[in-house]
Amino acid sequence: MKVLVTFLVDAKIRKIGNDILGKENVIWYPTISPAEILLIKDNNFPYDENVKFIQTITAGIDHIDISSLKEGTIIASNAGAYSISVAEHALALLMERAKKICVKRDETLKGIFNPESTQMLYGKTVGIIGYGGIGSRVAEISKVFGMKVAAIGRGYRDQNVDVFLSLDRINDIFKISDFIIISIPLTKLTYELITKNQLSIMKKNAIIVNVARAEIVKREDMLDHLRNNPDFSYLTDVWWDEPNLKDTDFSNLVITPHIAGGRSGEIMEFAFKQAFQNIKNFMENKEVKNIVKRDENIVISRQSLGV
């Protein structure tokens, strides 16, 4: 089988792909030739009825329209490839707000010495919505801080979870958690999953960290909650209509520009290795990971693409 990489990559990534898949099996962009397998990053890829397998380099596929693909074509995401980086970013955001790092930095640069109380992570409960690669890594780190872990997932759990709930019990996790980490994929099931119904039952000084997709949270409800609850904090690596940042003038809001997945070579090399290995598994009739459930897929038009 031939593998067509549909976007430009550097020489180091080409070597990784050639080593895993065999140089004779890979067609590298800008060369475009018929292939049974595609590696893609967005909607710009050639497709015909001979394509049997499509692998994305991105963990999320909510920016890719797969509605026109024939039923027999298998699509796999690259979920898990960026989990370590994203989990670290989530905890960094949480630490920033719990310890008031940015607020105190800004004050001290202005010559203001204003000690205030901060929050401990130890003994607190972190609720993780989406217990996959990111969520499980967040839980592992959280345990080091002495936190209790409540998680929502589809069945997988490990020794780091104290309370495990299904998605239909999402309100329960908002009631018991001091901090919430959103790390669940955006699908038809999770679009605007979090609304005023959940926000209204949180603790007054709760912190939500979103390292998934902005649309999992209902925009109007979050903006209202930020406006009316100054002790609450929303820390997010994603924003609606990014890169256009609107309605962001809140002291209890911290936004980073979709960098949780990392932009460094070491992270991307790991992501490509995982993608190429999944392609190799397909070629060798071995187990393929992260097969997309088409009936749950949702497409959001995006100018800025993260991972």
Image (cartoon, rainbow, N blue to C red):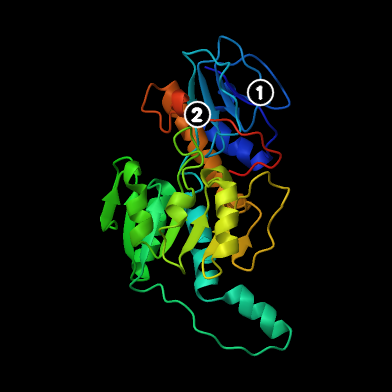
Q: Residues within 10 Å of mark 1 (few under 14, many from 20)?
A: some
Q: Amino acid at mark 1?
A: Phe
Residue 47 relative to residue 274: left or right: right
- Residue 297, label in figure: 2
Label 1 sits on residue: 45
Q: Amino acid at mark 2?
A: Asn
User: Residue 38 at what x, y percent from top left?
Assistant: 58, 23
**Rendered image quadrant of residue 162:** bottom left
Spatial separation of the CA atoms under disc 1 and disc 2: 18 Å
Task: Say which element carries label 2.
Answer: loop
Whether residue 139 can be seen here: no
Residue 58 is left or right of residue 105, and the answer is left
Q: Is residue 147 above or below residue 283?
A: below
Which mark is drawn over residue 17?
A: none
Relative placement, left or right, of 122 versus 240 is: left
Q: Is residue 152 above or below residue 104?
A: above
Quadrant of residue 127 within the rendered picture: bottom left
Quick one: 101 or 219, which is closer to the camera? 219
Q: Secondary structure at mark 1?
A: loop
The residue closer to the viewer here, 193 or 70, is 193
Q: Is residue 64 above or below residue 138?
A: above
Residue 245: x percent and y percent? 71, 52
Residue 48 x %, y %: 61, 11
Q: Is residue 113 visible?
A: yes
